[in-house]
């Protein structure tokens, strides 16, 4: 960001401008203003990812262990699946097992931009020491941040906006679902237990200095995001958003890249307003949404719920979509569920990207031409999940290779094509 402000083009800017097919001067200006962030820690040898205005909508996949299921090999495989199916970034949200070891392993085996929530590690360490999470010291919190930065984590979710004032307001503004962010809850409980301000808020300038040293991006976590439709766009959510807006400004003044996390569970008719409000409150900071989920009743299918919300949010200006898997609200996702989550969210992102980028639209155009010509190999190759498309066609193969078993001899494309071409030869 400092280079961008000085009018310089960095290696990362050149890479992203080329990859995305955007003008480098426009990109530089957007980075200088904080409207685009370039995700890459200086210690991490990965291809950077740009997020924000004028760039393609990106997709993140969350992986990581839980207290109940600790299988590092499976998490590494999930990260590989996320990469294979086109996620731009992963977040390691592990809470069970040896957290630093898991992170190192994933980063070693799967070279891609990675985000984490360091407060999880501070909380895990307390449990390892047989202490209560709220007993963690300010040093414990900052040590966790520093160790993630040293490891090369590219973006860190930190819930700086969960302030003492916000916690006071929580008492006066009860919710149906309450607080669903783990990090947000840790901070709120810590503030109440210790009767002190959130250390990351109190020492925000120091936090920014640490981030600046590694050119890591702060992802300002929405600790008070709504966890159900009845709590959407409520006072607590918006109050936190405006605190985050001020934090973005301070980060930019220090040359630290900042993006903003958003909800959550939002009714479909409130998504656009939420995105616009976030962009206004944060002076167009890159906006990273979880879903949003447009209904609360789709357990087992929340990858679809989130993709619907994600497409609408992206159309309204959200820059970064965090996937949701079919296991959301039910269990830690397995490998197949990670795949389904990534594909659903990629479809949402692509649906918007194709309206903005010629090469993304070309993909659809080529598919349309292949369908019109009944060129099946090409259609299968162009499918977002080629293996699945091949499997379905093979399982229910038609009597004639030109058509498919949906209509067979009634194939509209074939009938019309045969008549149009009659007598041409
Ligand atoms: S058989 Fe029906 S569904 Fe299949 S390609 Fe022809 S028109 Fe399309």
Image: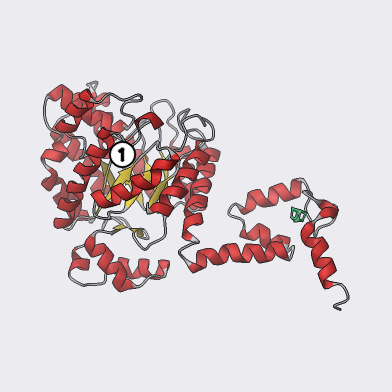
The residue that disc 1 covers is 100
Query: Where does residue 86 sit, x and y in percent of width and height?
Result: 49, 53
State whether residue 121 appears in this view.
Answer: no
| Crowd class of label 1 (few under 14; some 14 to 19; many from 20; radius 10 Å) | some
The residue sitting at 20% across, 55% down in the picture is 256
- From the top left corner, tell me how far across and down residue 183 is, in percent: 28, 33
Examine the image and state in which quarter residue 69 appears.
top left
113 on left or right of 239: right
For this orientation, the residue located farthest to the right is 423
Residue toward you, 155 or 166:
166
The location of residue 112, given as percent across then percent down, is: 39, 53
Return the x and y of residue 361 as percentages of the image width and height.
Answer: 53, 64
Screen quadrant of the C terminus:
bottom right
Residue found at x 75% / y 45%: 395
Quick check: 355 left or right of 191? Answer: right
Mark 1 CB within 8 Å of ligand 1: no
How many numbered discs, if any?
1
Residue 47 visible, this orientation: yes
**Circle 1 SS class:** helix
Quarter occupied by the N terminus:
bottom left
Residue 404, placed above or below residue 105: below
Q: Residue at x 31, y 44 (%)?
A: 261
Q: Quadrant of ligand 1?
A: bottom right
Instruction: Relative to 11, say whether 211 is above or below.
Output: above
Q: How is the image coloured?
A: secondary structure
Q: Which residue is the extreme one toward the bottom?
A: 425
């Amino acid at each position: 960001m400092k280079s961008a402000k000085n009018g310089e083009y960095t290696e990362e800017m050149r890479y992203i401008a080329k990859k995305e097919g955007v003008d480098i001067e426009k990109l530089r200006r957007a980075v200088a203003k904080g409207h685009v962030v370039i995700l890459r820690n200086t210690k991490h040898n990965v291809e950077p990812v740009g997020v924000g205005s004028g760039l393609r909508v990106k997709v993140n996949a969350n992986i990581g262990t839980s207290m109940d299921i600790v299988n590092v090999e499976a998490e590494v495989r999930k990260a590989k699946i996320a990469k294979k199916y086109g996620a731009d970034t992963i977040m390691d949200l592990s809470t069970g097992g040896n957290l630093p070891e898991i992170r190192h392993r994933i980063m070693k085996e799967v070279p891609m931009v990675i985000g984490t929530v360091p407060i999880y590690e501070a909380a895990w360490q307390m449990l390892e020491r047989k202490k209560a999470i709220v007993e963690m010291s300010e040093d414990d919190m900052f040590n966790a941040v520093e160790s993630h930065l040293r490891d090369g984590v590219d973006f860190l979710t930190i819930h700086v906006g969960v302030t003492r004032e916000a916690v006071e307001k929580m008492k006066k503004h009860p919710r149906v679902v309450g607080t669903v962010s783990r990090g947000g809850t840790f901070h709120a409980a810590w503030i109440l237990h210790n009767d002190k301000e959130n250390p990351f808020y109190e020492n925000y300038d120091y936090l920014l200095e640490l981030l600046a040293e590694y050119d890591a991006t702060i992802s300002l976590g929405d600790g008070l995001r709504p966890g159900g439709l009845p709590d959407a766009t409520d006072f607590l959510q918006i109050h936190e958003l405006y605190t985050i807006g001020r934090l973005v400004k301070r980060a930019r003044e220090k040359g630290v890249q900042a993006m903003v996390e958003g909800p959550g569970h939002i009714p479909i008719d409130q998504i656009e307003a939420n995105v616009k409000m976030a962009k206004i409150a944060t002076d167009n900071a890159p906006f990273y949404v979880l879903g949003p989920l447009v209904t609360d009743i789709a357990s087992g299918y929340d990858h679809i719920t989130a993709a619907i919300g994600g497409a609408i949010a992206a159309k309204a200006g959200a820059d970064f979509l965090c996937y949701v898997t079919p296991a959301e609200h039910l269990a830690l996702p397995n490998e197949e569920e990670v795949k389904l989550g990534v594909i659903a969210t990629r479809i949402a992102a692509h649906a918007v990207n194709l309206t903005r980028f010629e090469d993304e639209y070309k993909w659809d155009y080529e598919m349309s031409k292949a369908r019109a010509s009944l060129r099946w190999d090409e259609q299968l190759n162009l499918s977002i999940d080629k293996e699945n498309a091949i499997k379905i066609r093979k399982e229910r193969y038609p009597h004639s290779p030109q058509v498919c078993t949906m209509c067979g001899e009634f194939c509209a494309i074939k009938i019309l094509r045969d008549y149009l071409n009659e007598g041409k030869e």
